[in-house]
Image: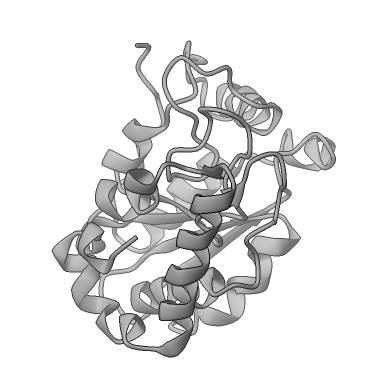
Amino acid sequence: MSPDQLPSDWRAVLADEFEKPYFKELVEFVEEERKNQTVYPPADDVFNAFKATPYKKVKVLLLGQDPYHGPRQAHGMCFSVQPGVRPPPSLVNMFKELHDDLGCKIPNHGYLQAWAEHGVMLLNAVLTVRASEPNSHKNHGWEKFTDAAIKALNDREKPVVFALWGAYAQKKEKLVTNDRHRVVKAAHPSPLSAAKFLGSKPYSAINKALEEVGQKPVDWQIPDR
């Protein structure tokens, strides 16, 4: 796991982080975990959220917590699963609400690359996890790194809509200090809070916020594969 895996634009705005002790300790921790445990996502996929959505092209930041912890699910983008993998319950609820909110057809897969290419950065707060052990890599430094990414977007002149779903993500609202940006909150789409998420129309709320700051709305329709 190396800063060289990040694309050059993100590497430039996060350069200071790589020299800090916490990041070096984080790299050592993850490398040690990979020697002794099964860790998701694969090493080459850890920074996929940054690779898929360049710094200057981020329109929406959708923040998750930590990666899926089942085989072949996680690939470095929050809520998304690799092609051919059944969408987990949270993603099923997201698609159901997407259909009810905007009339989008529910796709036949759970790979959210199309959103990333339309400017929706799919960032987890923690970027690795031990197999079958949710939150097993929290408090080892990832949160400091992803907070730095949120702050870098907050520092940007071009407005960003921060989509914070659930209590964990909403704690990050304090990092959004420039009023040129927008924060759109909703319940988390997991089965535990689906009753509040379903019917909340979060996608149209994000698009409305984008239009308020002079940005084009996101095309949320994911093509079938």
Instruction: Identify the colour scheme used.
Output: one colour
Give coordinates of residue 164: x percent, y percent.
Answer: 60, 58
The residue at the far left in this view is 8
Front one among 207 and 6: 6
Answer with left or right where residue 23 lies relative to residue 201: left
Front one among 87 and 22: 22
Question: Quadrant location of residue 42?
Answer: top left
Residue 22 visible within the image: yes
Question: Quadrant location of residue 71?
Answer: top right
Q: Is residue 9 above or below residue 220?
A: below
Q: Is residue 35 above or below residue 84?
A: below
Q: Is residue 104 above or below residue 4?
A: above
Residue 146 visible within the image: no
Give coordinates of residue 63: x percent, y percent.
Answer: 54, 56
Give coordinates of residue 109: x percent, y percent.
Answer: 47, 16
Answer with left or right where residue 125 lies relative to residue 12: right
Residue sitting at 27 percent across and 40 percent down?
117
Q: Quadrant location of the C terminus? A: top left
Give coordinates of residue 174: x percent, y percent.
Answer: 60, 81
Residue sitting at 43 percent across and 45 percent down?
76
Residue sitting at 48 percent across and 67 percent down?
182
Residue sitting at 52 percent across and 20 percent down?
103
